[in-house]
Image (tube, grey):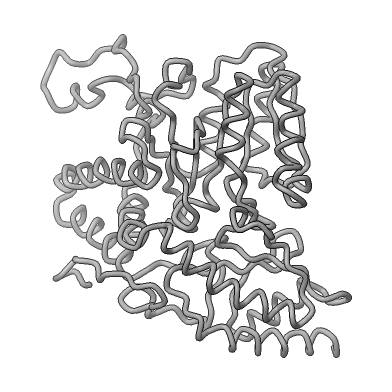
Amino acid sequence: MSAADPTPPAPQLGSRAGWFEDLRPFAYLNHAAVSPHSAPLRVAVNAGMGAYAAEGIGGFGATLARRNALRGRLAGLVGGGADEVAFVPNTTAGVITIAQSIRWRPGDRVVLFHGEFPANTTPWQLAAKQYDLALAWVPLEAFERNLDEGLSALEHELTRGVRLVAVSAVQFRSGLAMPLRAMAERCHAHGAELFVDGIQALGGTPLHVDMGFDYLAAGGHKWLMGVEGAGLLYVRRERMATLEPRLAGWLGHEHAFDFLTRGPGHLHYDAPLRTDAEVFEPGTLNLLGYEALGAGIIPAEVLGVAAIHGHVNAYLDELEAGLVGLGFRSLRSAARSGRSTILSLLPPSGVDPIRLHAALGARSVVCGLPDGVLRFSPHFYNHAREIPGVLDAARAALADCRTS
């Protein structure tokens, strides 16, 4: 793929060819943090910059067309409609948008989870102060021990009356894939809505609107393999009429561009707001970020998220067995349905996880360290032939940590 031939090469499971040939680490296992920038992504971004360099505003039309097409492509990843997707800069912005758009009543209860990433707690905590809401906290440990135990804990809160439940599709620390379908069924049976932080799932672990969630937000720089600053918000069509878009801006109006393109007489201050999810796009979007995201999601489209999930889990099965044999304790769900594309482990007793993480990095094995656990998160291009080298690096890193 090049500027002369912008057609991206077909992605292949277990191969960096055409996508990550410039990636230096022997084993890059940190997509749960940040995706490397692929060759097709860089070509797409450079093409976008080139169009603006050559034409200025003349490059806007083609960019807008690609961005509108991307809206439909992103919707397709979850089985939704293009009118149900808004572009947002990151997961947090999507959470804030919904937290500030629900028509809250004083005393409404919101269920959050101890152990969640703060992007999916802080906006709800602030909304609780603003709108006099009550927060109920459910420990994630209940789900980690047993999915049925976790669902029972959720059901207990729902029977007391709940307006909304906010949860991550995949937990950032443990990698647990939450039982969204069962959660949605219970929420709706009790008149509650389900908001999902999808950033640790979308692109790596199957998500579909048939699971029943009402809202979903996700940044694009992890499993979707885009860049920071470009993400999406999904709003179930039936929920739009119940929301009050308090954060709308000039692009939230119907026919927002008319006064710029159709001559005099189209500048109005009483134009109606849009009734689809685009009302949540208040102003100018990140041009290059969405060019990048359009390239980043190609593997999910071509290979299929289910195939990526299966490939990565086969890799993690072998890696998990090897690391457990070295004394690590796996946090991976015993239930297949609870597995994502993340493998998290506690280091052997007495080993400092910070030093161990650094020692692995020094040996060209890149992983994460959220809240003191070692987190390994490969993607479609990682191959099982890396695993012996990763295990050798882990042995050497453990030896360093124990002797120094």
Residue for point 69% across, 45% down: 116
Going by the picture, which residue comes out furthest to the left? 263
Tell me the quarter of the image containing the C terminus.
bottom right
Give coordinates of residue 216: x percent, y percent. 49, 38
Give coordinates of residue 45: x percent, y percent. 30, 60
Q: Report the side of 242 relative to 145 (left or right).
A: left
Tell me the quarter of the image containing the N terminus.
bottom left
Q: Report the side of 16 relative to 165 (left or right).
A: left
Q: Report the side of 240 relative to 57 (left or right).
A: right
Residue for point 70% across, 35% down: 112
Give coordinates of residue 277: x percent, y percent. 38, 28
Give coordinates of residue 347: x percent, y percent. 78, 73
Q: Report the side of 149 relative to 214 (left or right).
A: right
Residue for point 72% across, 62% down: 331
Image quarter of residue 330: bottom right
Instruction: In the rendered view, tell whether residue 134 sits above or below residue 312.
Output: above
Going by the picture, which residue comes out furthest to the top? 270
Q: Is residue 276 or residue 337 the one in the foreground? A: 337
Image quarter of residue 235: top left
Q: Is residue 46 or residue 260 the one in the foreground? A: 46
Instruction: In the rendered view, tell whether residue 390 sits above or below residue 47.
Output: below
Count the labels in the image: 0
Residue for point 47% across, 79% down: 383
